[in-house]
Every structure is written in C-alpha cells, then in structure tokens.
Amino acid sequence: MSLDSKIPAGEMDKKWTDYKGHVKLVNPSNKRKLEVIVVGTGLAGASAAASLGELGYKVKAFCFQDSPRRAHSIAAQGGINAAKNYQNDGDSVFRLFYDTVKGGDYRAREANVHRLAEVSNNIIDQCVAQGVPFAREYGGLLSNRSFGGTQVQRTFYAAGQTGQQLLLGAYSALERQVALGNVIMYNRHEMLDIVKIDGKARGIIARDLVNGTLERHFGHAVLLCTGGYGNVFYLSTNAMGSNVTAAWKAHKQGAWFGNPCFTQIHPTCIPVSGDHQSKLTLMSESLRNDGRIWVPKKKEDNRKGVDIPEEERDYYLERRYPAFGNLVPRDVASRAAKERCDEGYGVGTTKMAVYLDFADAIIRYGKIEAGKQGLENVSEADIIKMGKGVVEEKYGNLFEMYEKITGENPYEMPMRIYPAVHYTMGGLWVDYELKTTVDGLYALGEANFSDHGANRLGASALMQGLADGYFVIPYTLGNYLADDISTAAIPTSHPAFEEMEKAVSDRINQLMNIKGKQTVESFHKRLGKIMWDKCGMARNANNLQEAIVEIQALKKEFWSDVKIPGDVNEMNPELDKAGRVADFIELGELMCKDALNRNESCGGHFREESQTEEGEAKRDDENYSFVSAWEYKGESDWQLNKEPLTFDIVKPTQRSYK
Amino acid sequence: MEHYNMNLTLKVWKQKNSTAKGNFETYQVKDISSEMSFLEMFDVLNEQLITDGKDPIAFDHDCREGICGACSMYIDGRAHGPWSKNTTCQLHMRAFKDGDTIVVEPWRAAAFPVIKDLMVDRDAFDRIIQAGGYISVNTGNAVDANSLPIDKKDADTSFDAASCIGCGACVAACKNSSAMLFVSAKVSQLALLPQGEPEREARVLNMVAQMDKEGFGNCTNTYACEAECPKGISVTNIARMNREFLKAGLSTEQ
C-alpha cells in the first residue's frame, strides 16, 4: 500500500473551495439510512457528532466520562485563533497559514494547514451564534489578545476558560441533536476495538464501564476523536483518563501512526512536588507576556527568590534570545529551562524549577495606574498595591490556582515553574479527507497528526478540533458515504463482530487472570519515567535504544505480574486503566523508535546529535522532510513509510529567535 | 511553604452498586504529605488497598484542575470539602492536620443514584440540557461574529453564569436536593444574550419541566448552593430564572 494524501490539485488558496465544489453528495433521504459512529466528545467529537446529526445522519457518540461535557478540551485555557483581522493589524488567512506552518517547524502538510486557516473564521461565527460568551470590548465587539509565535492579535478568548466555553457550546449542539433523536449518546462507554468487514471499518466493540458488558455497534463509518496520548509520560497536563487506546486499536488494525514522537512540552507548568504527584497543571502561556523567567547566577543558591538581589539573577531567556526574550516559542523556552536545571541552577526543594517573576510587572503596572489616576508622590507600597490589582485583573484565576496547589502567594514571591508534557502533534496518519489508512475510519482533532507539524502554536488546538468537526468532516465524510448508500446496516450478529467481541473479551480475561503483585499505577509510573528520561525534552540514540529495551522488558513484566482487583462485570476503574496502560507501553516503544529514526531536531523533537554550536535545534530538511507513517506488522515490529513533504508556499528556513 | 506529614483516619462510603446497601468503612492512611491533593491521598489509599488484596474506592475524577466537573466528594459535611470556591481535586492536604478523622460520602440526591462508592449518576443534568440548554443554530448558519454587538456587562454576566462546571455540588449541598442553581446558570447565560432571544420562553419552561421530572427538589432560598459552588455561581441567577419562568408562563397562557 502506498500513501496517498489526496491533496486536491490547483492553487493553494483554491484547493478547499474546489474540493467542496466537486465532492460527492448524499441526498437527505439517503443520509437517514447511513449510520456514523463518533468516539470521543471533545471539541472534535462533539462538533462532528452535532454537525452530522444536523445533516441527518444517524449518529452514535461514545465517551468514557460520565458526560460528554467533561472531555479534556474543557481544560484549555488561553484561546482560539482565527484570521478575522478584527484588530486591523494585518492578519489574513495567509498569515495564519504561514505562522502555523513555520511554527510547526516545517513538518506539517501545507494544504491541510491552509484549509484550517480558511475555516478558522467560520468557527468564531458558529460559536458566537451558539451563545459562547467570548470576551468583549466596551463597544460590544469581540476582544482579541496576543499569543506566542505571532505578531498579530488573533486569539479569541473567554477569560482563562476558553476551552470550557467552546466545549460547552459544542456539547449543547450535541445534546440538541440527542433531544431530536439524531444522535444516541453513550456515556461511560469505552471503545475497545474496531470491527472491519471486507477491509472497511464497520463498527466498534465498546464496553459499558458501569457493568462491564461488551456491546457491538455498527456504523457505515467510524470517526475517532479521542485526543492525544501525552499520558504515556504518566505525568502530563492531560486529564487522568486521557488515553491512546482507541487510536492504538485502530493502529493495530491497519491505521498507520504519523510522527508518534512529536510531543509538545509546555514551558510553564507547576513543578512536581513529590512521588505522590498524579498530574501536572498548566499555567497559561499568556503569563509570559508579563512574567520574567530567571534562575540564580550561583549554583545551589538556597536563598529565597525574593532575597536574591537583582545583580545575582540570570534572566536566561532575555540573555540568550534578546529579540524574543521571555516570549520565545514553547519548545525553545522548555529546553532552556531544562538546560539551567541540569546545570545545577534550579530552584525550590527539588531544584527542578525556575522562577517566573511578576515583581517588575507589578511595579510597572502600578506606576501606569498612578499616572492614569493623576497621583503624584505615590509611595512604593501604594504603587505595588495598585500594580497587584492590575495583575489580578489579568491573571487572577491563574494566580489563585497556583496558590491552591502550592500554598505560595505568587503576588509576594515568584512562581516556580517547570516544563511538562502537554500535547501530542503526532497521531493517526490521515489524508486530506481526514481518513486513516483504513477505509471508512477517520481521525479528527488531536487524535490525527496533520496540522501542527513538529510544534503546535498556542491557541491552535481548539481551532483544529472545531475545524475538523464542524467544517471539514461534514464534507469529506459525504464523499465516502456517497458510494455506500446501497449498503444496508450490517447486523451485529455478523461473524466479524462476533470474533472481535471474543478477542476483546479474551484480552480482558487475560488481564484479570494475571493476578500478579504489582499495581497498574506502578507500571504506568515506571513507563512514564523511562519516556521522560529518555524520550522527553532531549533525546539521543543511546538513550532511545536503551529505552526500547527497557520498555520491552516492562511489557513482559506487566503481562506477567500486574494485579487488577475486582471483577469484569462491574464498575472497575483499575481494569479500565490496565487496558490503557498496556496500550501506552506499546505506544511508548513506537515513540522511541520514531525518535531514534528521526536523526534531526525539529520543533518539540530535540536530538542532541543535531544541534547548532549554540545548542539550538538543527533541522535536516534534506533527509527528514517527510511524515513518518508507521505501519504495524506484529509485536514490536513496524514498517516505516514516508510521506514526502513539499513546501510550495512557505519556504523552510532556520527558525531564529535571537 | 512548610510541609508536614500526617496520619489520618478516613470514613468512606462503600457501596457495591446502585442496588446494594452501602455503609461506611474506616481506613487508616499514614505519612500523607501536606503537599498532596485530596485525590492523591485517595490514590495512596487505593494503592495500599490493592496491594493488600482489598477493594479500592471508586470515585469520579478526570482533569484534576477544577474544570471538568467530574470529581464529587462530600467531605466532612460539605460538598467538595472545607475550602470555599474549590473542587475536590483542588483541595490539598494542608487543609488537614495530623490525627484528623475525615468523613467522605457521595453526593446524596434521589436524582443522582449511586453507581459505586463515591460515584453517582448525573445523567439528569444532560437531560435537562437536552430539554433546552442550547441555541438552535445548525453548523454553517451563523452570521459574522461581530455583526451583533453585545453589551460588555451582559457578556460578562453571561460568562459568569456559563462558567458552571456541572458538578452537582449545588444539588448535594441543598437540603431539598434542588437543581435550581445549575438550571438557572444555563437559562441566565442564554437569556442574557440576544442570540438566545427566539427560544427564550420555551427554553425556561422546558428546562424547568425536565428538572421537576428528574426528581430534584424545590428551592427554599437557603443559598447553600451558592456557598458550596466551586465556581461561585451566584443565586441571582435563580432570581433571574424565576422572572423568566413567570414571564414565559404568562405569555404562553394568552
């Protein structure tokens, strides 16, 4: 099989329009006969299920949470990009397209990114029409703010809860379709495998998590909108339940995996406080607009941050990158923090943290405030007080969250931050129509690989999830289903369903019967440590080779010594987790393999062997300008297929932020 | 922040499934760090229970950063525990001291049946949203987002109501198990926006009807819901919903 990305011919800015103009359509009476399965109800899944329901398809949607509203899109803080150019500051579809391809370090597919930029404006219109309460100016029009990697203000936001508001918008559209009978919603259900008939995806096996029953569900097509796999690192900003299982099952059934090693490590997260840590919390990128990042100039300096005088502080981002300073892109900021900590300049009890300091911003804003109010001879204490007020207005909810978690007051002492796993750019390989290498099986949102290359820009994940669900899949899916209108619903008594249900059931019983000594959680932690140490922010061939061996050993140990309490036919969160961790272990091996194969540095993927003299990432366009699409061949056995990347519009250059 | 370790006694509600009779079980946990979150303390306890061959405690949780609304523990007589404007997942152990006994129960409400231990079924909330918690606009129907200016004050008030996370603490905190705060937050969000205008009356009537059908109790204005709401949703939303409901009732009777 060869990879065909099915990118339409023609000029870049006409491709999507031409595609829509010529795509096959399904008439309304046929839509009623076609069934579509949507797995996952985050931004991509909820928007897809709602939009397809509105079109008249019979949709079944699944989520493992107790309600579709809890999908982890809900936690996105900062905002959503769109090329509206409401600020008259020179934005356009082309600029958003250009910034996204460049920000992705030239490892994304141009045509997909251009389409994303084109539909970005429709997303904002749609969300406002649904009643999403975006931030507004006093004139009643929408407000925008800046985000990393761009020079325009194109980010729409709802305080620090943009993901929540967008998801609740999509959720309400979804629930409306449930009420109308167009969508059947299955809460607390987990997809455990794909059913294929004659090479096409024709349904899923799902497990009702409340009573453990396995269910068969038919669909003319199956859409995976199941998010990213950052939890392979154990500690990440993902929700506890976020997992790779649906995507991994699809992969093992023939869906190739694109760029699995491309992981985004976000620079500003609350650091790990101890072995008990279960997850990491993000502090929005917007904080870097006003906060200054530093470490002491002296190694092992144990004084409190506030007691270290100005001249003994190293504002290392400002020192290394004078042009961008604290606003360098995420990958650069993360590596710089790691470098300082590895050299022994880290702060806090664990020494694995750097300071994010608002003292200067507080004084700056305080002085501006005093000026606004026409006050003279203001005492320093009053300036600080006014400055704190301004900072609170801008970042209050984040400061509060920081204080809840750490017990420290960030208005009085600098925040401690450290990078953490946040997003995975890699995912199932899809063509222009979002179809995987399995016919009838689609991947949307973070679950696919297509739009962010090797590094995602801030405020682009929400944009992509909603673009795929609201504005792309309703067209591309029709092009597939138009040829399927005479296929009657296949009864789930078909042998393919029976066999797959048996395979799923056997695997569950196998897990339950291991009856070993070690908990699921302990295996997950060990996997996370291998991945973080050897396939994390900096990678090299030796470490990756070691990691592969260690993961294979861990897999063996897991399948012979894991201990799962309880029974199959009841609510059993440990069993659910065991299945997910088993899949993470296999994925971890593939990520290391992919990272080992890609002997260049690009975006979030930093190979120590490929860096400039100053320690910056060095891309190798001659040898690695391709998408790695891994084909599953058997246990620990994959074949690498390459989709060459060509850049007709945005010519690759070395990114520099100095 | 100075941290310390503590030993605690936990009295936790255990219930095998929705039909089984539940009871409190007592557990001891040792060397709990004040830096842990409350749920991380439960993780420690569960690891210990699994290792000892006992049944771990089932509870809902997902994002662990106070926004998904999954976590739902009733701790020492308060929904989400002792800190105000806080979810269970963001409660940290420095709220407790060495030797404390902590009682943990699920949300108690007829409309929220227990699934297992501390996990309850909140599907009733989804059904209330299905009854009208939306604006009927199909994908692709929208006009330009800036074609409809909205007073910033209204937009901000709408946002405040929209920040509800649907956790159900308001119901758990209410002696009548009323869902008025949850329902009124959604009604308010949409009533404050011009986009919500065409369906305004039908929305409030249908959502209230569904709320009653689900078996939630009446509101007797004790404001326990607002006091325990992790997002600080205001009871003024209930007043607004009551006005909307009355107005809608009057106009549909004509």
Image (spheres, grey):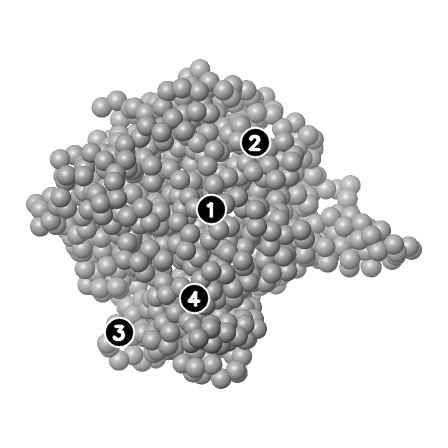
Discs 2, 1: same chain? no
Q: Quadrant of residue A91?
A: top right
Identify the residue at horizontal 31%, vertical 30% (top origin).
Answer: A23
Does A516 appear above or below B29?
above
Residue ID for mark 4 = B203
Cα gap from disc 2 to disc 1, whole angstroms: 20 Å
Residue ID for mark 1 = B142
Cα gap from disc 3 to disc 4, whole angstroms: 32 Å
- Disc number at residue A465? none
Cα gap from disc 4 to disc 2, whole angstroms: 38 Å
Q: Secondary structure at mark 4?
A: helix
User: Dot 4, how many residues are within 10 Å of its Cα: few (below 14), some (14-19), or many (20+)?
Assistant: many
Q: Secondary structure at mark 2?
A: loop
Q: Nearer the viewer, residue A399 or B178?
A: B178
Which badge, 1 or 4, comes first in the chain's sequence? 1
Image location of residue A83, percent across then percent down: 55, 36
Letter of the chain that mark 3 sits on in the rendering: B
Q: Secondary structure at mark 1?
A: loop
Q: Quadrant of the C terminus of chain A?
A: top right
Q: Quadrant of the N terminus of chain A?
A: top left
Residue ID for mark 2 = A92
Which badge, 1 or 3, comes first in the chain's sequence? 3
Does A261 appear above or below A466?
above
| Residue B96 seen | no
Please tell me whether mark 4 or mark 2 is closer to you in this view.
4
Image location of residue B139, percent across then percent down: 40, 46
Discs 3, 4: same chain? yes
Q: Nearer the viewer, residue A641 or A562?
A: A641
Identify the residue at horizontal 84%, vertical 56% (top origin).
Answer: A373
Residue ID for mark 3 = B18
